[in-house]
Amino acid sequence: MRKILGVLFLLACTQQMFAQDTTPKKSAEQMEQEYKNWTKMRDDWPNFARYREANAKLAESPVPANRVVFMGNSITDGWINASPEFFSANNYVDRGIGGQTTPQMLVRFRADVVALKPKVVVMLCGINDIAGNTGPSSLEMIEDNIASMTEIAKANHIKVILCSVLPAYDFPWRPGLEPVGKVMALNTWIKDFAAKSKVTYLDYFSSLKDERNGMQARYSGDGVHPNKLGYSVMEPLAKKAINQVLGLK
């Protein structure tokens, strides 16, 4: 009898659980947008389309003597919007795409860097891998992608500047991941790899970090992406490294 009552109790609980399902239902508009985002990712995962037209226009003109390409994610993507004169006045080309991880950058590296025939590429990448934007990534996976892009650049006679990952104490879009340790470990590897590969290491981290090794609040609104003041700290550091690589004063 007790067994029968136990079974009936479990059945009643199960029915109640399904009856009280409070999972928010997605609207037709939300599902349609998710499908569009998925098909866009499926059809053009590296986002070649983002700069295809701009690259074609650059190809129509003579290549400047000291062209520099900035390769990266939203931090680079947002830079040209916050400080367009930094790029226009110095003959710098911005090829950042928001949200991207190093495997996406590696796939589009030839189209968005090599094909533009720059003298220098400035690579700022890795934070979105740590955030898991395109799935889980180990530090070794990130390092392999950075190493591969470096090797491709060097094989095409492009000088490489490897930037430290910027400080981040937390991700507003994925809170609780505690990225500080991984950011610092990746930066240690990038610095060591740059030395072994005889390329330039550019340290943004030390100038932007706070006492927690996150981003100083005055340099960012969300703790990850620099604001105008944050970029103003990065710009002289970048320009100094670029000029040194090009042999300019």
Image: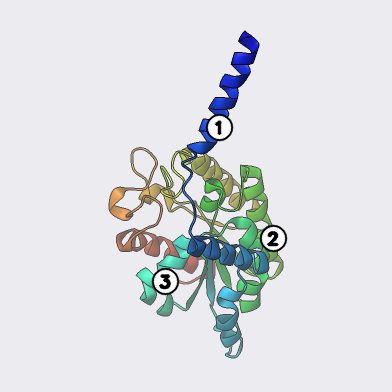
Front-most of residues 224 and 37? 37
Q: Mark 1 or mark 2: which comes first in sequence?
A: 1
Q: CA distance from mark 2 to mark 3?
A: 26 Å
Vertical placement of residue 176 versus 246, above or below: above
Q: Is residue 243 visible?
A: yes
The kind of residue on which mark 3 rests is Ile
Secondary structure state at the residue bearing disc 3: helix
Q: Mark 2 highlights which residue?
A: 151
The kind of residue on which mark 2 rests is Glu
Q: CA distance from mark 3 to mark 1?
A: 56 Å
Verify CB contact (< 8 Å) between mark 1 and mark 2: no
Q: Position of residue 149 (x, y in %)?
A: 65, 60
Q: Position of residue 24 (x, y in %)?
A: 46, 48
Secondary structure state at the residue bearing disc 2: helix
Q: Is residue 46 visible?
A: no
Q: Mark 3 highlights which residue?
A: 80
Q: Mark 2: give few (<14), some (14-19) or many (20+) Cα within 10 Å.
A: some
Q: Mark 3: give few (<14), some (14-19) or many (20+) Cα within 10 Å.
A: some
Q: Mark 2 or mark 3: which comes first in sequence?
A: 3
Q: Quadrant of residue 13?
A: top right
Q: Mark 1: give few (<14), some (14-19) or many (20+) Cα within 10 Å.
A: few
